[in-house]
Image (spheres, helix red, strand yellow):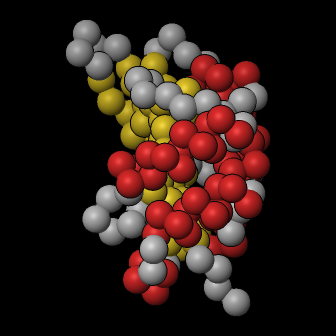
Amino acid sequence: MRGPVQSVEVSYFVHATEDPVKLSTAVSAMFSVSTPPDEEKMEGHHGNPITRIKYHITGDAAAVVLTRVSKKLDAATKQELARSLGDLLDEHSDLYLRFNKQRLVEGSLTEGIADAVKVKVKLRGYLARGDIIDFYSQILAAGGP
């Protein structure tokens, strides 16, 4: 049976001063990601190398990622996310979360804005007809879909 989560995308930037292996290991462990990522090499404003890393996870593995996220969040962060869910959704009911990259390397998930690990959750279309905010609130509170 197909679950409610269609896909999850986890992405972040690796700057020249960061250890790409350390970041990759931390992200893989935090989100239970085992698929190889897509990598895009870029150049920063001052010519410094930057790599964009993007994991695209589908099916049951995507549901596992969302479950891990909801279980790793502390109660205060869950409450804050629940209050701001309307601002974290796009017109397609995709959920956008941003986590502090440095804290993630240390083993915890906290909200982040600049230089964040971004998580995009896409639900299956048939669920978009209901109350999406309630649906995401329940997922985050319950520890997964």
Question: Closest to the observer: 71 or 134?
Answer: 134
- Point out the residue furthest to the bottom here: 1
Residue 109 falls in image quadrant: top right
Q: Is residue 138 visible?
A: yes
In x, y percent, where is residue 28? 70, 43
In x, y percent, where is residue 113? 43, 28
Q: Residue at x 49, y 38 (%)?
A: 98
Q: Is residue 90 above or below residue 113?
A: below
Q: Is residue 129 above or below residue 9?
A: below
Q: Is residue 67 visible?
A: no
Q: Residue at x 64, y 55 (%)?
A: 140
In x, y percent, where is residue 91? 28, 65
Q: Residue at x 50, y 28 (%)?
A: 112
Circle count: 0
Q: Is residue 71 above or below residue 143?
A: above
Quarter of the figure with the C terminus: bottom right
Residue 130 falls in image quadrant: bottom left
Question: Closest to the observer: 78 or 145?
Answer: 78
Relative placement, left or right, of 60 versus 57 is right
Relative placement, left or right, of 94 versus 78 is left
Q: Residue at x 72, y 30 (%)?
A: 108
Quarter of the figure with the N terminus: bottom right
Question: Closest to the observer: 92 or 24?
Answer: 92
